[in-house]
Image (cartoon, rainbow, N blue to C red):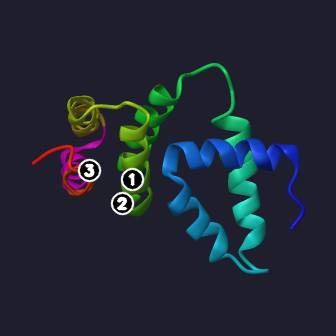
Amino acid sequence: MAESERFENGLKNRKEVLGEEYVNKALDNSNDFTWPFQQMVTEACWGDCWGRPGLERKTRSMLNLAMLCCLNRPHEFKVHCRGAVNNGVTPEEIQEILLQVGVYAGVPAALEGFKNANEVLKEMGVVK
């Protein structure tokens, strides 16, 4: 598992957004079959995309929440909800994102997003 500079940059971004414990667990649980995917995600998503200067991390997090909610990807939505809070996205901003999802992608998508975000935000102690 050779680690390139591209991988190291992505790993740094990934840990800063999602937390070192979460990322280390994902990497530690990989094997010969799943490692290429972990490498691709770390380099392409977290290095190439999240490492670009064009948008702030907060904005990227907000976009991810909207897209993952619309795509009905609850596990990744929850992961990125935690990351969004780490990147400075407030509960009020998450609420606004989900209200907009309701208008443009449908109430069922927003309902699921509110359920998942509420769970994460409560776990993080950000809302009661």
Count residues near mark 3 (Cα–Cα under 10 Å), then give few for <14, some for 14-19, many for 20+: many
Query: In the picture, residue 65 is in which quadrant?
Result: top left
Going from N to C along the chain, the mark reached first, 3 or 1, is: 1
Q: Position of residue 99 (x, y in %)?
A: 20, 34
Residue 70 seen from this side:
no
Contact between marks 1 and 2 (CB within 8 A): the answer is yes
Q: Which residue is mark 1?
A: 77
Residue under the point 42% across and 55% down: 79
Amino acid found under the numbered disc labelled 3: Gly
Residue 91 belongs to the span the image colors magenta? no
Magenta extent:
105-115
75, above or below 102, in the image: below
Amino acid found under the numbered disc labelled 2: Pro
Residue under the point 67% across and 36% down: 49
Q: Position of residue 117 (x, y in %)?
A: 25, 50
Q: CA distance from mark 3 to mark 2?
A: 8 Å
Q: CA distance from mark 1 to mark 2?
A: 5 Å
Amino acid found under the numbered disc labelled 1: Phe
Query: In the picture, residue 12 is in which quadrant?
Result: top right
User: Dot 3: what SS?
Assistant: helix
Contact between marks 3 and 1 (CB within 8 A): the answer is yes
Q: Which residue is mark 2?
A: 74
Q: Position of residue 62 (x, y in %)?
A: 41, 33
In the visual, does 25 lie left or right of 124? Answer: right
Q: Position of residue 78 (x, y in %)?
A: 36, 55
